[in-house]
Image (tube, rainbow, N blue to C red):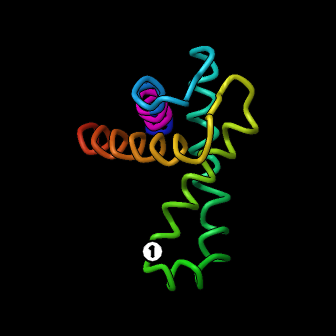
Amino acid sequence: MKFLTRVLIGALSLGIAASVVPGIHIDSPLTLVLAAFLLGLVNAIVRPILVILTLPITIISLGLFLLILNALLFWLVAAVLPGFHVAGFGPALLGWLVMTLISWAASAIFRE
């Protein structure tokens, strides 16, 4: 049940990000749910590996490189999933930021 709640929160936040940020377009509700699921999967599996591999750059940039890494992962999911379109790095960064803030707030509200 907790997994389903997280995917729905991710889908809700991604849908809001797509409606607020110009340059992000999602073709269908099914694509929205698949994108939220894939983003969660990428953040759980790929992101920790990349954080370790890019640790020197992250330390030198005082953590700011993590913003770039997260935006690139958002953009990667859009490149892999048909029906989820991100126009460039700027919309990816803004979309990730909006999605993260909304997910954080919704997770705080629905915390078990």
Residue in the image at 43% along x and 23% along y: 19
Give the residue number, with chain letter if any, for mark 1. Answer: 63
Give the answer, above or below, for where 31 lies relative to 79. Answer: above
Magenta residue check for 59: no
Residue in the image at 26% along x and 45% along y: 108
Q: Residues within 10 Å of mark 1 (few under 14, many from 20)?
A: few
Indicate the secondary structure of the residue bearing disc 1: loop
Quarter of the image where the C terminus is located:
top left
Q: Position of residue 65 (x, y in %)?
A: 52, 69
Q: Quadrant of residue 102?
A: top left
Give the answer, above or below, for where 93 lies relative to 26. Answer: below
Q: Which residues are magenta?
A: 6-13
User: Quick one: which residue is furthest to the top in this view?
Assistant: 28
Count of labels in the image: 1
- Please give left or right for residue 58 compared with residue 99 in the image: right
Residue nearest the observer in this picture, 39 or 25? 25
* Overall secondary structure of the magenta section: helix
- Please give left or right for residue 6 compared with residue 78 in the image: left
The amino acid on which the numbered mark 1 sits, given as a three-letter code, is Gly
- Please give left or right for residue 11 compared with residue 81 in the image: left
User: Quick one: which residue is furthest to the left in this view?
Assistant: 109
Residue in the image at 53% along x and 78% along y: 58
Residue in the image at 58% along x and 61% along y: 69
Magenta residue check for 9: yes
Q: Position of residue 90 (x, y in %)?
A: 52, 46
Give the answer, above or below, for where 22 lies relative to 44. Answer: above
